[in-house]
Image (cartoon, coloured by chain):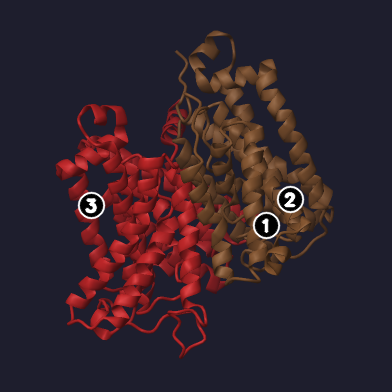
Chain colours: A brown, B red
Amino acid sequence: MDVLKDIFTIHLVLSALRLASPIALVALGETFSERVGIINVGVEGTAVLGALISALVAYFTGSPWIALIAAPIAGGLAGGLHALWCIRFRANHVVSGIGINILVAGLALFITSSVWGWRGTSTYSDTINTWYITGAALVIIIVSQIFLFRTKWGLRLRVVGEKPEAADTAGINVHRTRYIYTILNGVLCGLAGAFFFNSVGRFTSGMVGGRGFIGIAAMVIGNYTPVGALGAALLFGFIDALQMRLQSFIPSQFSIMLPYLLTVLVLAFFIRRANVPAALGKHYVKQ
Amino acid sequence: MLKRSTLLREMGITLLSITLAFGIGAFIIWAAGFSVSAVFINLWKGAFGGKLAIGQTLTKATPIIFTSLSFLIAFRCGLFNIGAEGQMYIGAMVAAVVGAHLHLPIVLHVVACLAAGGLAGAFWGWIPGYLKAQRGVNEFVSTMMLSYVAIGFSDYLVAPRGPLHDDKYWANQTVRIAATAALPRILKPTQVSMALAVAIFFALLVWYYLFRTPAGYELRSVGLSPPAAEYGGIRIKRKLILALSLAGLLAGLAGSGEVLGTHFRFIGRFSPGYGWDGIAGGLIARAHPIGAIFAALLMGALRAGGMQVQRSGAAPGDIAAVLQGLVIFFIIAPTLVRTLIRWRRR
């Protein structure tokens, strides 16, 4: 029992909340983009980009606050690129997202080697307290829930993902709406990337470690709602926090596996798929 | 099958995409303050400049042929297998165990190792296939997650004090496989082995399966239109499970080939990302099994060339990974290159 007392403490709850925030941000972003019909599996790479740009800007300006602004901007650019590819060039959404992940992975290694001389890692810089990002994430999620279901803009964006033809007829610009929310997805993922950078103080190429993909899982389990995404993210954040505690009790290779294994199990047992947007992943061609 | 003119146009667009990607890559190299010509000369030298270089390219291309096939066979069924990396590790581990601890005559031992490694990989692909068909679990996320699990598990097995660790060395690796289990080297002194021939054989086999058998036709029709396939009497769930199992099998063979032909043992974290290269290879090949051979050669050449760029000090070798990412980006936007061609004609 003493072992359990050592594991389950108030610190565990707090670190669960903290670790949930980047997953929640990614899940929220993906909720927005999938609600307008754009699948973006490039969220993993976008978060890596956010962390990388944070490290670069913090290194060159010396200011972690400027880095905090730069990361979401870089993420937004990646989101815009994905939107351009999916909408203008009609690329398969999943394939374009994979492209972002692979390109960013390559860029991360190349840039770290070029700037710091170390493959895949940066030097340490000043950081901000990650609780700022966690707090901001909570506020953004509650505002998003209201925005999505209680405002006319929320209704419009949901129509675009559900029935783009109807949205078009009603005078909503389908493509513009899709661009806006796919870019917003990128911005939120960039912020998640900034969280990863600030929680360590430097960039390492494996630091996001699949948490972007876990964010997609959280969006699915949260059933395409911001508050649902937060709930699922809290579960994954808790698993992540628990994993770190368990490292002193079981071989670390096993505890590191835990979040990934549990993500698959959670997806297998807790799935509800009521709110999948009807036009998800489909290209819209104006008649 | 594609008509000859369509095939030629597709190949033209692919080559143009690669050229465009290298153009942007040159700009990045220049912007980062490196010599563009030095990078490209070393890239070429490392990939094709002499027997040793070609050996490197072919060695690296071999597992990528398998992982490209792994990605594309699932893709043809409308699925995304992102977990080839983990399936490859599972296959490699099992092949290494069978290779070291089973005593069989020559040839038979190799076949047993390949079969065991392939089946182990197939099992690791079957899990997400089953979850997709029965529980609707997004295979993109599950294959990825299971990949992390597989790699973590292999780390545990070969770490010091792990059950498969070779106690004679500090390194995280298993004992050496028996001589009877080794695939012969075919381009000495380089590491190119018969695994390359096996890979090409499987590329032909996958092509035959997909385009010349009723079962392959059914698999592709699920990818093209699930409702139409179901209407045609195809049991979709079975096909989904089969496609991901076959994808796992091919990735498992990639790992087995690495153990039997390149390293002669399982080495922890032996892959520099061959599973990811397979996604790139499958996409660049536009999901065509024969194209996968050439796409894998391109990926292998980039890896081998990147190493030479690193050695020469012209730039970080990871510029090759950037080039790879750029190539994918242009390949996947079919209307982009066409738009550019139209602009020029205007």
Residue with the mark numbered 3: B206
Q: In which quadrant is the N terminus of chain A drawn?
A: bottom right
| Vertical side of B153 occupied by B21: above or below | above
Badge 1 element: helix
On the same chain: label 1 and label 2?
yes
On the same chain: label 3 and label 2?
no
Q: In which quadrant is the C terminus of chain A drawn?
A: top left
Residue with the mark numbered 1: A241
Say whether disc 1 or disc 2 marks the residue closer to the N-terminus. Answer: 2
Nearer mark to the viewer, of 1 and 3: 1
B263 vs B161, nearest the viewer: B161
Badge 3 element: helix
Badge 2 element: helix
Residue depicted at 66% across the width and 45% down the height: A234
User: Which chain does the residue under circle 3 lie in?
Assistant: B
* Residue B79 seen by the camera: no
Type of the residue with mark 1: Ala
Rendered image quadrant of residue A80:
top right
B24 vs A166, nearest the viewer: A166
Type of the residue with mark 2: Arg
Q: Position of residue B203 (x, y in %)?
A: 24, 56
User: Mark 2: few, some, or many residues within 10 Å (few <14, many ≥20)?
Assistant: many
| Image-based side of A207 in relation to B132, left or right | right
Rendered image quadrant of residue B119:
bottom left
Type of the residue with mark 3: Val
Using the numbered discs, state the Cα–Cα distance from disc 1 to disc 3 in whole angstroms.
44 Å
Residue with the mark numbered 2: A18
User: Which chain does the residue under circle 1 lie in?
Assistant: A
